[in-house]
Amino acid sequence: MHTQTILLSIGAFIIALGVALFQYGYASKLNTRKKIIFIVLRFLSVFALLLLLINPEYKAYTFYEKKPELIVLVDHTSSIAHLEQERTVKDFVTNIKGHKKLNEHFDIAYYAFSKTIEDTLDFIFNKKQTNIAKTLGQVQQMYQNTIAPTLLISDGNQTYGTDYQFSTRTYKNPIYPVIIGDTAIVVDTKVQQLNVNTYAYLNNEFPVEVIVTYSGKKTVTTKLTITSGTKTIYSASITFSEQNNAQIINVTLPANVKGLNTYNATLEPIPFEKNKVNNTKQFAVEVIDQKTNVAIVSSITHPDIGALKKSIESNERRSVTLIKPSEFISLDPYQLVIVYNPNPEFKIIYDALRKSNKNQFTITGTHTNWKFLNEIQQRYTGDVKYQEEYYVPKYNPNFGTFLTEDIGFENYPPLLGVFGDVDMNMDHDILLYRMIGAIETKQPLLTTIEHENSREAVLFGEGIWQWRAHAYKENKSFKTFDDFLGKIVQYLSSSTVKTRLRTLVEPFYYGNANIVIRAEYFTKNYEFDRRGSLTITVTHKDQKTVEVLPMVLKNNTYAVDLSSLLPGDYEYTVKVAGEGISNSGTFSVLAYDVEQQFLNADVRRMREVAKQTKGVAFFSDQGATMINNLIADERYQTVQKSEEKTIALIDWKYLLGLLILVLSIEWFTRKYNGLI
């Protein structure tokens, strides 16, 4: 209790005593016995009232015993079922639940996991992905300040994510891996990995890299075939031995059919091979009939030109040609024209753009002749002063022309332009606003325009090469910037008229990946509409099964997760309720279960994890030994903890009750003695 509170309480005591003595001692004519009774009653009521006003606080301590936590993580992916270990896992968990001493010693929490942790004991063993590193990271976050050894019941086979062998080096609690599955090496051939580009060009060839492996001691011979439908495209004999147990096969296949083409790479099983599922891998290639040809027209040399070319050509479906206005011949070969810092030399270019109705991307800067630009086109007008100005980009989250995201634009270097306002004379959609220092404006830095079935994007600043360099500095990759620019190029290189409903669907998905279909829905003014009620109808082409699912609003798109779909070809239709608007298409799900590619438990990694975290690895038949080890470990003891609470006197109900009681007794006593 603070000194000030103590002094106030003493003062309250003195004041209460003084008031009681004055009222019933000095000024009262009652007899001595009654005086004492009334003095005591008045003192108690006044003192209690003053204490409530002072409201002193005191600390209360409670003591309790805290048992250590025991976290039981159970792998319920399909690899456990493929290894025929479902019953082993369930019996192991049941044994833990029923062990009296273990449950007395620990507070046990049970979780299932696959690609993420789940608070459930419903082990279904059909999950398609395993991410042990992420699961352990989530557990560490939940129990970071608690003594919580972790039982990791798994075969140790992770399909994606950070290598848990290394990520657990910072894990604070010991991990006890319980190794599920066969540890013996069995004879097996396997299509380990298959590398192929997503796209190829019609009447061209595309490379395929097939990595095949073998586990065994004898020398064996098998055959690798690549088929498309019933047609064999490639076939080769392969010989493995104990020393030569992996080979890389490079194949070049023809792209003769436009559209989505699916293939199977298959290793012929050898005698006594147990797992034949991993002998086949399916892949797909979308064959397109042309590249997107982009022309960059500039009369000056600038680092932006090289950055634009490198970024656009990072997508192999696109090629860039550099043109000077004085060397211009025709725009016919190009789907998109980038006009860089236009000046009167560009008149021939603008005349050709007007005649061909080509889409264009205009970039203005310090070398732009705005008098010429204002006269040659009417989409926007610049009232510029020819004074240089730096503009910081600010992302517009309401941009709806195409799907994009903020890649941290406000941290990007400013672009160099000229001082002055730009008036937009047509409907436009601003992607980036200008900021001058920390001052936000409503002036566009990057905007899109659609007019009479032609599209244009305008960037009012030069120096975009610095953005690409910044992206590499931040991410050690140009991908962030290249993807952003690629979306602009994709939008401008298409002549599709803008619609109120747009679906974002890949031509094919692998069966082990998340299958998410997205849609964008706009108002009649082409503003993103969050009020829409969208549904998707998915039909399996062969089985004719139909699913109708609602699409859920997430950020600026509607989305639906179709990861539960079986392999096959599908048709889909997205509809907006009450609007009569729909969009249809097709996609394919390729058969591939990565969990069925494993034959054995990953004993080495599981033991390494135990060693790094000061735990012990056990096999599934060592349950009793593991339990005794946990109970006997002196690190996991019940500890006594104290909890300190600061309690205010005003919260003490008994004092209020005492005050009411004392005042009531005083009132009745005064009434009885005729003093009222």
Image: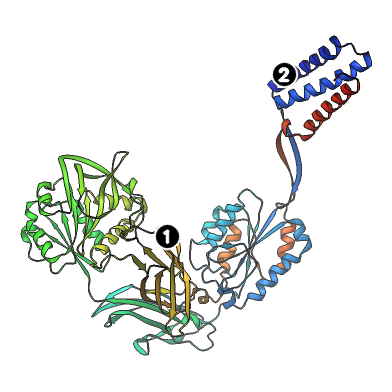
Q: Secondary structure at mark 1?
A: loop
Residue 38 percent location from the top left of the image? 87, 19
Question: Mark 2 highlights which residue?
Answer: 7
Which corner quadrant of the image does residue 58 belong to? Answer: top right
Q: Secondary structure at mark 2?
A: helix
Q: Is residue 623 left or right of residue 238?
A: right
Comes first in the chain, label 1 or label 2: 2
Question: Mark 1 highlights which residue?
Answer: 531
**Marks 1,2: beta carbons within 8 A:** no
Residue 124 percent location from the top left of the image? 60, 73
Looking at the image, which is closer to me, 99 or 663? 663
Mark 1 Cα within 10 Å, few/some/many (few <14, many 20+)? Answer: few
| Residue sitting at x 84%, y 28% | 664
The amino acid at mark 2 is Leu
| Residue sitting at x 55%, y 80% | 186
Q: Is residue 400 left or right of residue 530?
A: left
Q: Is residue 430 left or right of residue 33?
A: left
Q: Looking at the image, is mark 1 or mark 2 nearer the viewer?
A: 1
